[in-house]
Amino acid sequence: MTYTIDQLRALIRDIPDFPKPGIIFKDITPLLGRGPAFHAVVDHVAEAYNGSVDIVLGIESRGFIFGAAVAYALNAGLAVVRKPGKLPAATFAAQYALEYGSDALEIHRDAFGHPTRVLIVDDLLATGGTANAACNLVEQLGGQIVACAFVIELKALGGRGRLRPHPVSALMEF
Ligand code: AMP
């Protein structure tokens, strides 16, 4: 079966008050569990960047799921940004604020050479703090940010503005 964006959108499940009261968690697992739907999402995210990306940067941890698949679709390499203490070699770090809490992200200093065209991928754009930290890490490595690509954008939180001037794409808006 082929899926329209609205049909894909219907596979995102709202979990109220997770992980904290007041947060509506957008659960992607119903979408991931349907092969043709997962396939369609990856194709949609990747198609705008065909031929223009050397490295996809996946953000821990749900960004790894889509980032790896998008990298495969684009025949690009995959680099990862992870929570502190997870990467084994020398790293750069960037602090960020979450919709629920705060944290830091790290990248291997040799994650990619330059010049490198980098597509940052995550499942969801909320306030933009996480993706902004990933942009900061790409810049520390001297990479060129092609865009930040998300499956889901929570429009009301204004994350897109925070990522300016970088292009932002999102498959579904809520
Ligand atoms: P932010 O830094 O505020 O843009 O938050 C984005 C990051 O937090 C992404 O890695 C998301 O996976 C996660 N996240 C934030 N809010 C939600 C939400 N309502 N549902 C699911 N994941 C979320």
Image (spheres, rainbow, N blue to C red):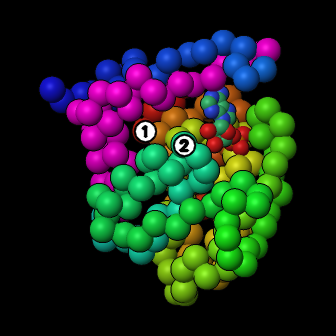
- Does the magenta segment cover residue 166? no
Q: What residue do we see at 32% from left, 60% from top? A: 72
In depth, the one of 149 and 37 nearer the eye is: 37
User: Mark 2 or mark 1, which has the lower sequence index?
Assistant: 2
Give the percent coordinates (x, y) of residue 140: 72, 77
* Left or right for 63, reference 135: left
* Left or right for 128, reference 49: right
Q: What residue do we see at 48% from left, 75% from top? A: 117
Task: Using a 10 Å C-alpha cutoff, classify the residue at mark 2 as few (fewer than 14 neighbours), some (14 to 19) or many (20 or more).
Answer: some
The picture quadrant where one finds residue 109 is: bottom right
Give the percent coordinates (x, y) of residue 69: 36, 52
User: For residue 171, which numbered disc appears in the image?
Assistant: 1
The vertical placement of 155 against 105, above or below, is above
- Does the magenta segment cover residue 44? yes
Residue flagged by tag 1: what amino acid is it? Leu
* Left or right for 44, reference 81: left
Q: Which residues are magenta?
A: 21-49
